[in-house]
Image (cartoon, helix red, strand yellow):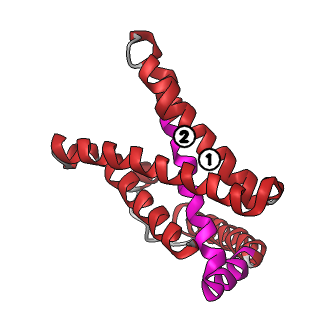
Amino acid sequence: FEGLMGLVILANALSMGVQADKGLYSQETMDTIAILDEVFLVLFTIELFLMILASGFEFLNTGWGRFDCVIVSSGIMSQWVLAPVLKQEANSVQLLLILRVARLLKLARAVRLMSQFRLLWMLVRGLYSAVEALLWAVVLAGVMIYIFAIMGVEMLYRGMWPRWDDTLRPDVE
């Protein structure tokens, strides 16, 4: 069951990628993607209910259970409740934009897949633990670039090279 839902999550992520590039696809393709979006929400809703039936309401006490509940609830609110109402009002463009951004939370479900693949999860945890070292490496690289930039300005502009053509000096400033 988890493997099947993993495939559904990946398919949903792919369809959201297609939706992001609306200008590249025909209207027929976009209509098909909109129908798939509804199917995905139905599947995620069924998954949530099945997980609650199988584990009881204890499922909602887990981190993933609460996460899935929030994602499915926001999907229901945005797609089935608010979007039809807001499409009729002309002044609701900004609210629809906020709802579209909220739909991106569904992409976060793909993170759940990583915990199913042990090696991939270990890689993600390793990268996460290396973030501090990577940030310090970026700071060090920035400091080095800054130092060499100052040295370059001093050497090129401040006259360390006596044969500098003075006609180029205003271009450097």
Magenta segment: does it hold 86? Answer: no
Q: Along the horizontal axis of the image, is 4 left or right of 115?
A: left
The image's mark for residue 133 is: none
Compared with 104, 152 (above or below) is below
Which residue: 61% across, 66% down?
111
Which residue: 45% across, 64% down?
8
Q: Do labels 2 and 1 touch, CB within 8 Å?
A: yes
Q: Residues within 10 Å of mark 1 (few under 14, many from 20)?
A: many
Q: Quadrant of residue 147?
A: bottom right
The residue beneath circle 2 is: 75
Magenta segment: does it hold 101? Answer: yes
Whether residue 84 can be seen here: yes
The residue beneath circle 1 is: 71
Disc 2 secondary structure class: helix
Q: Residue furthest bottom?
A: 119
Compared with 149, 82 (above or below) is above
Compared with 79, 85 (above or below) is above
Question: How far across and down, in percent of the image, does residue 161 sit?
Answer: 51, 72
Question: How far across and down, in percent of the image, does residue 152 sit?
Answer: 56, 69
Q: Residues within 10 Å of mark 2 (few under 14, many from 20)?
A: many
Amino acid type, residue under disc 1 in the picture: Ile
* 12 or 167: nearer the viewer: 12
Q: Quadrant of residue 167?
A: bottom left
The magenta span reads 100-128
* 132 or 168: nearer the viewer: 132
Disc 1 secondary structure class: helix
Amino acid type, residue under disc 2 in the picture: Gly
